[in-house]
Image (cartoon, grey):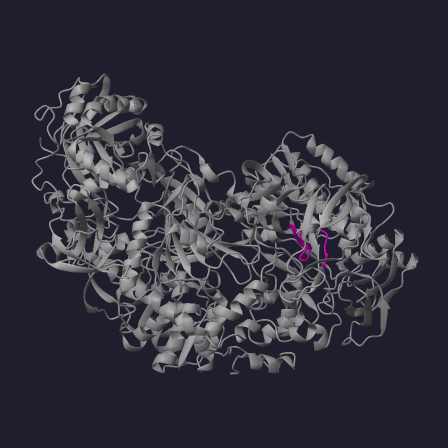
Amino acid sequence: MLILHCPYCGVDADETELSPGGEAHLKRFGPGSSDEDFQDYLFARENPRGVHFERWRHAAGCGKWFHAARSTDTLEVFGTYSAQTTEPPKEICDRISGKRPGWTWRLFG
Amino acid sequence: MKRYSAFAIAREALNYHTGWSRAWASPEPKKRYDVVIIGAGGHGLATAYYLGKNFGITNVAVIEKGWLGGGNTGRNTTIIRSNYLQDPSAAIYEKARSLYEDLSQDINYNVMFSPRGVMMLAQTQHEIRGYQRTAHANALQGVQTEFIGPERVKELVPIIDINGPRYPVLGALWQPRGGTARHDAVAWGYARACSAMGMDIIQQCEVTGVRTENGKVAGVDTTKGAIDCDKLGVVVAGHSGVLAEKAGFRLPLESVALQALVSEPIKPCMDVVVMANTVHGYMSQSDKGEMVIGGGTDGYNNYTQRGSFHHIEETVRALIETFPMISRLKMLRQWGGIVDVTGDRSPILSKTPVEGCFINCGWGTGGFKAIPGSGWGMAELMATGHSPLTEAFSLDRFKEGRFIDESVAAGVAH
Amino acid sequence: MSTRLANQGRLIDRSKPVKFTFNGKSFTGFAGDTLASALLANDQMLVGRSFKYHRPRGIVASGAEEPNALLGLGSGDRFEPNQRATTTELFDGLESASQNHWPSLEYDIGAVNKAFARFLPAGFYYKMFIHPRPFWKHIYEPFIRQSAGLGRAPKDRDADRYEHFYAFTDILVIGGGVAGLLAAKTAAQSGAKVMVLEQTAHWGGRAPVDGGTVNGTAVADYIAILVTELEAMDNVTMRLRCMGAGVYDHGYALGYERVTDHAPSLEGPRHRLWRIRAKQIITATGAIERPLSFAGNDVPGVMLAAAMRDYAVNYGVTPGDKVIVATNNDDAYRTAICLKEMGVDVLRILDARDTGGGELMEQARELGIRIDCGRAIGKVSGGKRVKKVAICAQAGTGAALEEISCDAVAMSGGWSPVVHLWSHCGGKLTWDDSLSQFRPDPNRPPTGADGQGFVVPAGTANGEMHLGEIVSDAVAAGKKATQDAGFKAKRTAAPRGVDTAYAPMEPVWLMPRNAEMELRTKTWLDYQNDVKVSDVQLAAREGYESVEHTKRYTTLGMATDQGKLSNINGLATLANALDAKIPQVGTTTFRPPYTPISMGSIGGEARGEVFQPIRRTPMHDWNEAHGADWEPVGQWRRPYAYVRDGETVHDAVMRETRNVREAVGILDASTLGKIVVKGPDAGRFLDMMYTNMMSNLKPGKCRYGLMCSENGFLIDDGVVARIDDDTWFCHTTTGGAERIHAHMEEWLQTEWWDWKVYVANVTEQFAQIAVVGPKARAVLEKLGGMDVGKDDLPFMEWRDGILGGFDVRIYRISFSGELSYEIAVSASQGQALWNALRSAGDGFGMMPYGTETLHILRAEKGFIMIGDESDGTVIPQDLGLNWAISKKKEDFLGKRAQQRSHMTDPTRWKLVGLETTDGSVLPDGAYAVGEGVNANGQRNMVGRVTSTYYSPNLNKGIAMGLVLNGPDRMGEVLEFPGTDGKIYTATIVDPVFYDKDGEKQNV
C-alpha cells in the first residue's frame, strides 16, 4: 500500500488515489522510425529488481501525472517529480546513488 | 525408483514407511549436458520431462536458484481451463488440459486433476456476446464449452446469488472438463519423473552468467560452477529479463504482484470453479475445504511478493456480492506472487537472438493451467526447432504487431 | 474432572450466571467467561475432531493460538463456522456446536483407528488413487472432499453489517499487554498521536496471571494505573477487542475490531475493519508457548502449561483434579505452583532437564510437589480424555519407568515470540540459542517509503521473557518509535520490573529424545491437521527438504492456526532429520492476517445496492417509471428497451425500432461522453488524437472521428464539433468518457506538455436527447424557437439557440440514418426538456427507445459500434474506414503502428454485411469455417459475426462480420456452425442494408 507525494497538489497520496502508468522517460517513436525502435518504444521495458522510474497519475486527486523513483524490491520511494521532464532531477539521482551505490538504469544512472 | 500405488503404501505401512526413497535425486552438476533448463518450476520441469519422454533427450539438467516448484507453480489458485478465444491460446491450453487428464498415470504421481468444471459468469450484455463468441470458437478449436443460462448456473452452483441487485447473472461460459489440480504435486511429480529418467535437478544453484560463442549458446556459469550445454532453455518467469540481459537481448516483460487468499476450510459447498470478471473475482473450493479466491493484479512493478490490500478488499467484496454466504467465512491467509506480463498479456515461447537459447516466460496470471502443454511445445521447439503449439507465441510478434490478445472476450485472465 | 474452583477467577463475575448451549445441551457459565473456560468449567473436555484422522480434540490453549476448539456459533443467517472457543466471549443465549464429526462428537465414524492411520502417512494421496484414471474424480476425490473441511458452510445471506474506519496515527501499538501499554505511554508523552490495539477484552496480557511487581506495585495494579493514564490522554486512542491483523507496506496496518460479537444485542456493526496508516508500528504481541512432542500429546486434557494457569487464575477453572506437569523450562513451574495453591493435586513435575530449574523449582518443592528431573512423558493414554501417563527418561527411547493415573497434563516446551506482524512486511528473524526461539532481528526490520525501519518489537514479542527486561524493552521501543516518527522522546527512566529469575531452558524437540518409531507416529506436531513427528521425518527422507516442501507435503502449519503451535517444533524436527541447524532450515513466510478475519469485514459497507456506485442520467427516474429494462453499461444504467404492459422485451424492441423509422423516437443519450478541448494548440492536438483531420473543421460543423491507441487499434469513435476558433467538443462512447479523457490528459501532460490545450470532461454537465425519425423536425418545430430546417441546420452541423424556452445546443447528426437531432441542455434542465419534447411529440407518435433499438438501427445502416465491430484487435482499415484516416497528416496516434507488417497484411479479416440464406438471424459470435484444419488440428476459420440482429424494418436477419478477403467476395456464401448443432449459411453482402444512398438523413 504505497504512499506517493504528488508534486503538483502536495498531497501524500494513498495508493487508492493513484493509477500507475508504467515506465517513465520513454522516448516516443512515430512514423519514420524503424520496426525495432518502435517495438522497443511500445514493449521493451526495464523491469528492474531495484531502482525504477515510473509514471503515476493522481487520478482520484488533482488528476496530474507525475514521476516516481522507486525501488521494486523494497518499495522505497527515492522521490517524486514532474512529469514534464526527460530525466529525473539530479538531486533524486544523487539520493539514489547514496542509498544504492552502483545503480544503473537504461537511460541514466 | 519405487512405483507409487496403494499396494506400495500398504507394504510400507508395515515398516512405518521407512523404506521410501527420495522422490528426486539431489546431485552436484556435471560439466556438460545436452540441454540445460534454467528454472525448476512447473514449466521448466515439464519441458525437461517431455524432452526425455518425446525425444529421448535425457542428458538434461534443470537448474533452480531456490527450491523446485517454489515460484508461481506453488502460489497460484490451481485453476485449469482452456476456454480461450484465440486459436494459439486455445491450442496450447487445451493441449495442457488434455495432458492433465492423464498426468497422474503418466508420471505415477497423483496430481489430483479434478475436472470439476469451470464457469465464467456473464453479467453484462457485452459479456454474454463475448462468451457466446468464445463458445463458437471453442467448438471449432476442439475445446468443449457451452454458453449456459442463469438457471443452469444456479443448478451447478447452489450458493450463487444470480439475482444480485447490481450485476445479476445473465449466463455463463461453462467448460465441464476444466477444473483444478494440486499445484505442488505437479512440480514434484514432474521432478520425480525427470529424476527417474536420469536427469539432474540441481536446486539452490543460481545462474550468474550465460556464455555464448559466435552468437550461439555455449553454457552457463552458476554458483555451483560452469556448465556447458548445446541448448539452453530459460524458464524463469519474472527473472527472465535479468537472464535475457546476461544473454544479450531484451524482453517485453514487466513483473507485477498478483494476490490470492483462502478462507478457513468448510465442508464442501461448491464443486465448480467460478470466475466473475465483471466484478473481478474468482473462487473455487479446494479438496481441503478452503475457498480459494483470486482477483486482479496490481498495476506497478513489484518484486516483493506482497500486494496492496485494497485489491483484496475489492475481490472479497465482489465475491460477497456473488456468493453472499461467504460473508461469515473468515480469510485464513493472503499471499502474493510476482507474475511476469508481456505487452499483449500472452506468453512468449520462442527462439531468441542467441542460437540455441530458448525462452519460455510471460505467463502472467495464467501459467499453472498451461504447464503440461507449455512443456510439451517447448520440448518440441528445443528438440526440433519448430512446434505448432509455440509458433504464434514467438518474440517477433511484437515487432510485427501480431498480438495474441485474450482480453477481447473477458476482462480478467487467471 | 474439569471443574470450576470455589473462589478464583479474576475475570468472571460469579453473580452473573450466563446460559449457553453446546451441541444442544444447556450449560451455565459466568459473565466474563470465554466459551472455552465455560466449557471446561462444565467438564466438556472433548470439543472437536481433527481434520484427517478425526481424533478427539480438547482445548489446548487459552488464546488466539488454539488449534482444536473450533466451533460453529449461532444459527440461520447468523451462523458462523470455525470460531475459536478460546477467543469467544460468553453471552446469554450463545449457541455453539462442535464440528467435523458424524453422527456425533462422541461417536464419529470418520475416526480412523490406529491400524488404519498407518496407511495414511504424510503425502499418501500423492502416491495413491492413481489408477484407474476416472476413479479420482468420481470415487476417491468425492470421498476425500466429504471428509475434508471443518465447519459446515453457512447457507444464508449474512444478517449482520460491517464497516470500515480509517485512522491516521503517528504510532500504532499492537498489543495491550504491559509492554504495549508502557511503550504507548512512553510514545504518548512526546505528544505523538498513539493508537493501541488489544485483541482481547482486557488490557494487561499475561502479566496479571504471571505476577511480579513494577516499581514495587503488583503488576496487575500497575497495569490498571497505566490504562487510566493512557485513557486520560487526548492523543491516545485505545481499542479493545481489536486485533492487529496485518502490517503492509508504507506503514499500512489493519485492525480487526469485533464490535458486537460478545454482545449481539448491541446496536452496531458486527466487525469493523480499521485501515490504519502509522509512521511507526510497535509490535507488543507477546509470545506463544510451545507444546512438547510426546506420544499422545493430543489427548484431550493435555494442555499448554500457561493456558492451564490462565484458566485457573482468570476463570477459576481447572481442567483436572490430578495434574502432571511436563517441561523443559522454569515457566511451567508457575502453573504447578498456582494449581497447587488453589488446592489442585499436582502429582508430578517432569523436568526434562537433568539439573531441573531454579528458584521456582525450589518454591514448588516447598509446596510439596514431587519433581523428577531428566524425566519425560513417554506416552499419554486415554481416548477422549487423559487417563494415565507413562514416565520415562528424557535421554532414552521411551521405556516406561512408571505409570501414573491422572486427568490432565500441563506441558511447556518453551516460548516463541509472536513475530507475525514484524514479519508480514519483510522483517527478518534471528535465532536465539539460549531461548531456542526466533526473535526479530533489529538490524533487518521491515522498511517503509523512506527505506528506514518502521516496525519496532517490544517485550516478549522481542524475545524478552522477564518482567524487568520486558518493561525496559517496552520503554526503549516506545522511545525509538517516537524518535523515528519524528518526535522528541521525553527523558524518563524505565520503571523497575521484578519477578522470579529462571534457570536456563533446554530445547526438547522430541520427548524422549530418541523416541522409538511406534511413539513418533503418535506424537503430534500439528493437532488440527494431524501432522506427526514421523510425517516430517518421512518428508525429509523423501527429499522434501526445504521447509516449504515439508510444510506443503505434510500440511504442517497450514491449518486454521497457521502453525502458531506447530511451526517451531516442526522446523526443529525437520532440522534434526536433515542433521542441520534450525536457523539453516529457516522459517516459512508469515502472511496476514494474524488470525482469520471475517470476509464481511473485508468487504465493508459496500454490498447489495451500494456495492458499486450507480450513475444516473437526469432522466433516470423517468426511464425507471416507464418500463426501462436496465442494461448496465459501465456504472451507468441505460434502458435496453421501454417495455409496456403485456409486452416481452423483444416485442418492445421491435415496436421501438419500427417506430423510429416510421414516426419518431426519443433517446436518452446523456451517457455519451462529452469532452471540451480548448486552446491555441487544440486543433493540432486533436489531429494527433484522431485518425482524421480535425484542425480544418469549420466552426459550426461536425465530423465523425476515430481514435486509435499508439499500438494502432481502434479505441473509440464519436462526433467532434468545432465550437469556435480554439474550442472543439468531442463526443465519446458511453463507456469511453473517463477513459478517453484520461488518454487525452496523459498525452498532454506527459508527451506534448508544451502544447497550449485544456481538456475538460463535461459528460455529466449536460443531458443529451436524441429526437430521431421522419417526424423529428416536426416535433422540434412544434416546440419552436429555433430554425431546424434542411438549410438552417444542415446535416453534420450544430447550432446554439432557444428551443421551446430551453437554452440548447442542437447537433444534426445521425447514428440511425434517419433525420435526427441531438439536443444538449444543462443537466438540470434535462428532465424538463425531455418532458417538453414528449409533449410536443404526442401528436406524432413519439416513443422513447432503448439501446437495443439504437443498435438495430445503426446495424441496418452498417454503422460500426465500438465494442462490437471493434474488440481491441481491430484497426480502422479492417472496418473499411480508410476514408476516416487522414493521408495528409504526418503523424497521429496509431499511424506508425498501422504500418507494421501484420497490420498491412492483405489477409486481415475485413468488414462486410452478412445475410442468411433463409432470412434467419445468425448466432452472435459465430465463426465462418474454411477448408481443413490448422497445424494444431483446429478447424480453419475465415471470418466471424460481429453484430447480428433481426431487423423488423427489413423483416429478416441482418449481420455484420469480419471476413477473410470479405470485400472481394460479395455474393459468396459462408458456413457458420452454431453451438446448437446447426450450420447457418450466409451470403456476403454490403454492410449497408437500409437506405444505401442516405436519403432519409439528408432531408
Q: Position of residue B166 (x, y in %)?
A: 41, 40
Verify whether residue C59 appears in magenta: yes
Q: Quadrant of the N terminus of chain C?
A: bottom right
Q: Position of residue C200 (x, y in %)?
A: 68, 44
- Could you say which is closer to the camera, residue B140 or residue B304? B140
- Which residue occupies 73% across, 41% down? C494
Q: Position of residue C972 (x, y in %)?
A: 10, 58
- Which residue occupies 40% across, 47% down? B169
Which SS does the magenta portion mostly show?
loop
Q: Quadrant of the C terminus of chain C?
A: top left
- Could you say which is closer to the camera, residue C834 or residue C4? C834
Along the horizontal axis of the image, is B17 left or right of C973?
A: right
Say whether residue C816 is visible: yes
Q: Position of residue C546 (x, y in %)?
A: 55, 68
Q: Quadrant of residue C562?
A: bottom right
Q: Quadrant of residue C255?
A: top right
Q: Quadrant of residue B339?
A: bottom left
Verify whether residue A67 appears in magenta: no
The residue range painted magenta reads C58-72
- Could you say which is closer to the camera, residue B247 or residue C709? C709
